[in-house]
Image (cartoon, grey):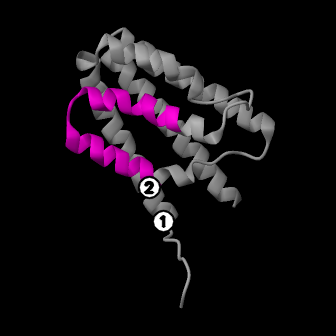
Amino acid sequence: NRGFTVAEISFKEQDNLFELRTVLEIYAIDKAVDLISDEDLARMREILPFTDSPDGKLSEKTIRENNYEFHMIPIRAINNSHLTRIVKNLWDLLWIYQLRSEDKETEKNASIKVLAEHTKILESLENRDKDSARKAVANHLDRLKAEFNEHKKIR
């Protein structure tokens, strides 16, 4: 009875975590449209190219850190420390389930989608368009959840 054990999260729990993340990020983006600063938008624009890597040149660590920061900037902009902490906890629970395909072409296509979705989120914030921002976040997270659910069927 020695050594390490890894707590497992059921597929149902993972679905529930994705659902919570989606609800909270849509709420946050709706508020952030009015509150996010030009400096925050500039920072999002700066890190956007590092939130995924269609050419495979960026490390997983670089992608993960920039992707997290990209999503957290609008959340922090609404200045709700409880929401920020809860979303961070969701990310911590879910990041281990962020799957990368072993197929290079599939991974490249997924990376291109992530960058396009992130661009849409950023442009919606820059345009101060709440409807577009909510839809962009919802579409992005729904696609990620669908990818995850598809991959878990294969396993």
Magenta span contains residue 81:
yes
Q: Would you say 112 lies left or right of 86 here?
A: right
- Amino acid residing under circle 2: Leu
- Residue at 46% x, 36% y is 68
Image location of residue 151, percent across then percent down? 65, 52
Residue 134 placement: quadrant = top left
Going by the picture, which residue comes out furthest to the front?
Answer: 2
- Amino acid residing under circle 1: Ile
Q: Is there a contact, CB below 8 Å, between mark 2 and mark 1? A: yes
**Alpha carbon of mark 2 to alpha carbon of mark 1: how far?**
9 Å
- Residue at 21% x, 44% y is 82
Task: Work out whether 84 lies above or below 108.
Answer: below
Magenta span contains residue 63:
no
Going by the picture, which residue comes out furthest to the bottom?
Answer: 1
Q: Would you say 72 lies left or right of 68 here?
A: left
Q: Can you identify the residue that label 2 sits on?
A: 93
Q: Say which of marks 2 and 1 sits in front.
A: 2
First-in-chain label (2 vs 1): 1
- What is the magenta segment's predominant secondary structure? helix
Q: Is residue 20 visible?
A: no
- The residue range painted magenta reads 65-93
Q: Can you identify the residue that label 1 sits on?
A: 9
Give the SS element for disc 2: helix
Q: Can you tell which mark lies on residue 84? A: none
Image location of residue 107, percent across then percent down? 72, 37
Crowding around mark 2 (Cα neighbors within 10 Å: few <14, some 14 to 19, many 20+) is some
Q: Would you say 61 lies left or right of 67 here?
A: right
Task: Work out whether 125 lies above or below 29.
Answer: above
Give the SS element for disc 1: loop
Crowding around mark 1 (Cα neighbors within 10 Å: few <14, some 14 to 19, many 20+) is few
